[in-house]
Amino acid sequence: MDFSAEIERAIEEMERGKLLSTVWAAIDEILADTSNPPPPPLVPAELEFNTHPQPVESQTEGYGAWIPMMADLHMFEQQNPLMAAPTMYDGLLYQGDIVQPGHLSGQAGVYSAGQYLPYQWPVADVPTATAVSHPAAAPQPYLPHQWPVADGPTATAVSHPAAAPQPCNIVPVVKLSEGQSLRWIGVQNREMLYEVIAKDPLNTFNSRKRKRETQQDDSRPYVKKPPNAFMLFIKEQRLSVEAEFNIKGITSAAVNRILGQKWKSLTKEEQAKYFDKAKEEKRLHAQQHPKWTTRDNYGKKRKRKVKASAFNPEEDTQQAKKLCGTSVQTAVMESSSSLAEVMESSSSLAEVMESSSSLVEDLQTVLVPEAPQTQTVLVQLPHSQTAVTPVCDMRHLPQVYKVSPASWLDLPETASTSLASPAPLTVTQSPPTQRMSEDRCHPVMEPLEPPSSPHCTASAALL
DNA sequence: CCCCCTTTGAAGGTA
DNA sequence: TACCTTCAAAGGGGG
């Protein structure tokens, strides 16, 4: 775009204030198309303003910057006669139709569109309060004037000492804090006046910038989240689990259920290896993508539907059949082996019943999702050489089966293959109290298919 | 073709 | 602060 032609035309046709607006609009447009804009020329480049605030070597790391604030107004006036005759108002001089300070202090960033340079100076890591400084009369040493800046989005910092124009080698500075920027607001007593603008989410310029960034987001390559410890564990263990269970076409979901159980069975020390690895991955990720946050990926992946947890016996049974060998079985196995221990160690029937009731409660917690009043849970017991005989039957407690302790030893082998036999017995159970994660394996209303392995001959069901 | 499933942990948002 | 939502991996299943 030929901005000089536009400016020339504007000079001829427009009034002074309009010219200024046009120039600002042009610069605005240029910057809007610049993904990484240059430091802000607070006046148009064509006007050859002597010493715009420019970034200089920062005294801090990163974005921090000391910004000189100086203008040789004589030169400014000579080269820009139209702009060199500002209006006097309330002790301040203003260019064009610039907003009054009273407005500024209340609403930073509400200037007429295009009049001000939409640029946010990247500054950071400055712990102290912002100070806007202006020089005393030359050639006296520069004495910074501390100007209080409000802790909010509307900070305005303007100083107006009655000082003569300063030679260029005396450079007052202002150090901006993170999120703050400078905005030229006019001229007073031959000094350029700047406003310090703090963070302002409603700032039109910020909004525009955010919009630009959003647009850029879409074109930027997708950066994935760094994996957490569990993800690293899954990645490492998946193949071995698939090999271990040796089930053709076992789903990743099923494998993940097993790995979830495995993960929880690891000791802190064993898990620590993966946490350390995840920490390192995260560090490298932050190094490679310093500006990336998890938020960047939000909505990029289809939102997962939260499945209703309505109790559906048929569907649940099918689901349970599919999941045989995963969490149902894992939970049952754990419960079964615990029950075996109880039976082995208990000296009386009462003791067995008491211990087993808590076991079943635990099992319910694992298997039963959100709380229908009655649920059926299939309990698969491992193979027993001896006959299975119910030894008690009472309300609110599970059926307890007497099983030869020796028969509990072959648990690992039956883990992926044992299935229940028909004709389960039932007792009443209180609904579980613990909320389940979504779509956990539902309870089973009917016996599973006949055993595919001779290992399993015993089953019990709890209602 | 693309989402779902399934797990745990991390991060960001909301009340 | 507690709770909720989303996304990391994986690959078969299904619409």
Image: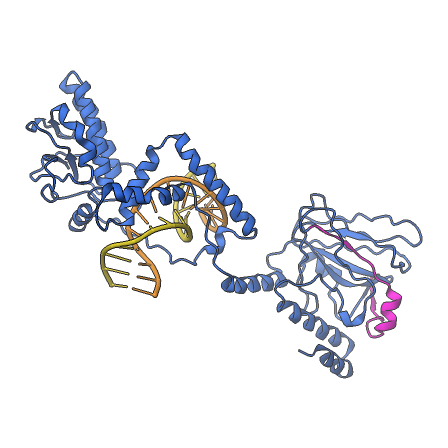
Chain colours: A blue, B orange, C yellow
Residue that appears at 75% across and 70% down: A97
Given residues A302 and A162, the one toward you in this image is: A302
Q: Residue furthest right?
A: A139
Q: Position of residue C4 (x, y in %)?
A: 39, 47
Can residue A370 be spotted in the picture? Answer: no
Magenta residues, start to end: A64-90
Can residue A293 be spotted in the picture? Answer: yes
Given residues A147 and A7, the one toward you in this image is: A7
- Determine whether, in the image, residue A206 is placed left or right of residue A346: right
Asked if residue A218 is among those painted magenta in the image, a careful observer would answer: no
Q: Position of residue A272 (x, y in %)?
A: 43, 34
Quarter of the figure with the N terminus of chain A: bottom right
Quarter of the figure with the C terminus of chain A: top left
Whether residue A378 is situated above or below residue A172 in the rendered picture: above
Residue that appears at 79% across and 62% down: A52
- Determine whether, in the image, residue A141 is placed left or right of residue A128: right
Q: Position of residue A387 (x, y in %)?
A: 5, 28
